[in-house]
Image (spheres, grey):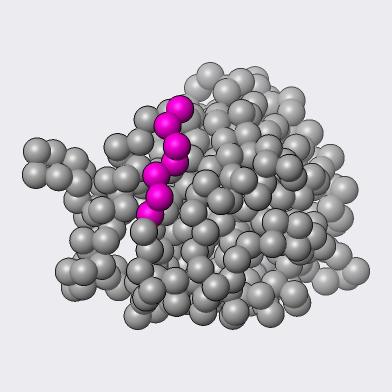
Amino acid sequence: MFQEAQLYSPVKADADGVVVELGADHPGQGDPEYRARRNAIAALALGWEPGQPVPTAEYTEEEHEVWRVVCRELRAKQERLACRAALEGREAIDLPTDHIPQLADVTAALAPLSGFQYLPAAGVVPSKQFYGSLADRSFWSTQYIRHHSVPLYTPEPDVVHEVIGHAITLADPSYVGLYVAAGEAARRVETDDALTFVARVFWFSLEFGVVDEDGEPKAYGAGLLSSYGEIEEFVHADLRPLDVARMGVQDYDITHYQPLLFEAASWQQVQDVVGGFFSDVDDETVQRLSHEARSRA
């Protein structure tokens, strides 16, 4: 399985300051200005303490332009390929399209809709902390944005994914119970294997889930909703029936479009099956489902 920590560029802090270590093939690797921006934005999150106001990232006009391009291009694709609940959430939160919103602004917009708050993350957040915080209606989010040379591509989750992907779903009541239940599940399980199973189900549902609506596959996962390329490609994936046992053991690789996804027969099935799993799962359940999935392989 592609390890979650590899989704994010490593962040290191020492006496010389905060450094985000971009990979050799990262679009911003050869751009000193972009690298300095990434270091400065990561330092904001690392310097934050719970209870303090979320730090403000002073975005440049170039960064705001990336946001504008992504909003413009994604909106039309979401209209065609996003599920109804996601579109209703998008309209309810009414994100700005002309500038990158601050995390505090996202929290303020979500307050009357779901009560979720956004917290600043420099990069990867440990799984138990990230998923568990969902039970408290807290969502850890990066603040940096992708490199301006490729506004419709990012090799790692950025503020576009965290906000255009997740915030629109966190604005819709039918999603909120799923997120909260996933957080409670992450806190309930005790072993690393069980937590990994829960995280995989989250991945193939709230990140890359597909649902049938009126006979057509529609995206409901934030990873699909926020990806200019993958929101078109998911309809060509091997779409399997919703199956939490298989989802919990299925490997994936974020560096490619997903070749295999799980499609629910209806939004109600997502609520019943995925929501039911998150609400009831414990370590014994994971052992049973893992055995069941592998016996069918």
Q: Is residue 294 visible?
A: no
Q: Nearer the viewer, residue 186 or 76?
A: 76
Q: Nearer the viewer, residue 68 or 61?
A: 61
In magenta stretch: residue 237: no
Q: Give me the residue at 15% from left, 45% from top.
A: 17
Q: Which secondary structure dominates the residues rendered in magenta?
A: loop
The single residue placed furthest to the right in the displayed view is: 214
Instruction: Decide if residue 21 is on the left or right side of residue 73.
Output: left
Q: Is residue 61 visible?
A: yes
Instruction: Decide if residue 33 is on the left or right side of residue 266.
Output: left
Please report the bounds of the magenta region as a residue range: 51-57
Image location of residue 269, percent across then percent down: 85, 47
Q: Is residue 57 above or below residue 122?
A: below
Q: Give me the residue at 21% from left, 61% from top.
A: 36
The single residue placed furthest to the left in the displayed view is: 16
Instruction: Decide if residue 265 is on the left or right side of residue 186.
Output: right
Q: Give me the residue at 28% from left, 58% from top.
A: 38
Q: Nearer the viewer, residue 159 or 215?
A: 159
All told, the count of numbered labels is 0
Image location of residue 212, percent across then percent down: 83, 63
Q: Give me the residue at 57% from left, 23% from top.
A: 187
Q: Is residue 147 above or below residue 16?
A: below
Please tell me in which quadrant of the rendered image residue 143 appears.
bottom left
Image location of residue 62, percent across then percent down: 37, 75
